[in-house]
Image (cartoon, rainbow, N blue to C red):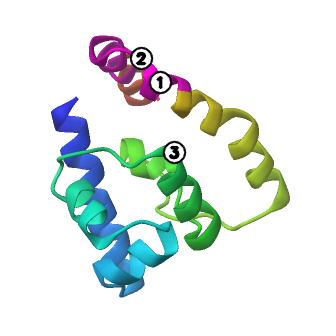
């Protein structure tokens, strides 16, 4: 999981810099402290459900790109995408964050293998 946490942190840095934002500016949009953003960017923690939701809704961050590094970094905000995120991704991420670390690792490995076969 540490490797994935580090990769997510690196992608958050890349995303933030692509917007020309400081850590303070991205923290304001994510509704968290700059210290929390630093912890994500340095791989000490994964972003919470609320942080991901805020970055998706306020900055059009692609959750697929954030987690896997595949696809476009951002997306065009449309009603259908918003509904898809609310109906599937967020409840899934919330449930996954409650799972034991070993189960999280297994799921991430499965998702990675599926994405790499395309």
**Circle 3: element type:** helix
Q: CA distance from mark 2 to mark 1?
A: 5 Å
Q: Earlier in the sequence, mark 1 or mark 3?
A: 3
Tags 1 and 3 in contact by the CB under 8 Å rule?
Answer: no
Q: Earlier in the sequence, mark 3 or mark 2?
A: 3
Q: Quadrant of the N terminus?
A: top left
Span shown in magenta: 95-109
Quadrant in the picture for residue 107:
top left
Let me know if residue 64 is in the magenta part: no
Tags 2 and 1 in contact by the CB under 8 Å rule?
Answer: yes
Residue 52 image point, x, y percent: 50, 53
Relative to 73, is 104 above or below? above
* Residue beneath the point at 35% across and 12% down: 103
Residue 96 disc label:
1
Crowdedness of circle 3 by 10 Å Cα count: few (<14), some, many (20+)? some
Q: Which residue carries the number 2 mark?
A: 99
């Amino acid at each position: 999981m540490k490797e994935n946490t580090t990769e997510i942190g690196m992608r958050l840095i890349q995303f933030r810099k692509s917007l020309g934002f400081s850590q303070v500016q991205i923290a304001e949009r994510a509704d968290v402290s700059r210290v929390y953003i630093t912890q994500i960017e340095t791989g000490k923690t994964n972003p919470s459900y609320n942080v991901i939701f805020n970055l998706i809704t306020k900055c059009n961050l692609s959750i697929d790109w954030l987690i896997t590094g595949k696809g476009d970094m951002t997306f065009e905000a449309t009603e259908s995408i918003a509904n898809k995120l609310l109906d599937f991704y967020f409840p899934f991420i919330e449930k996954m964050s409650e799972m034991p670390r070993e189960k999280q690792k297994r799921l991430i490995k499965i998702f990675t293998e599926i994405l790499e076969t395309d």
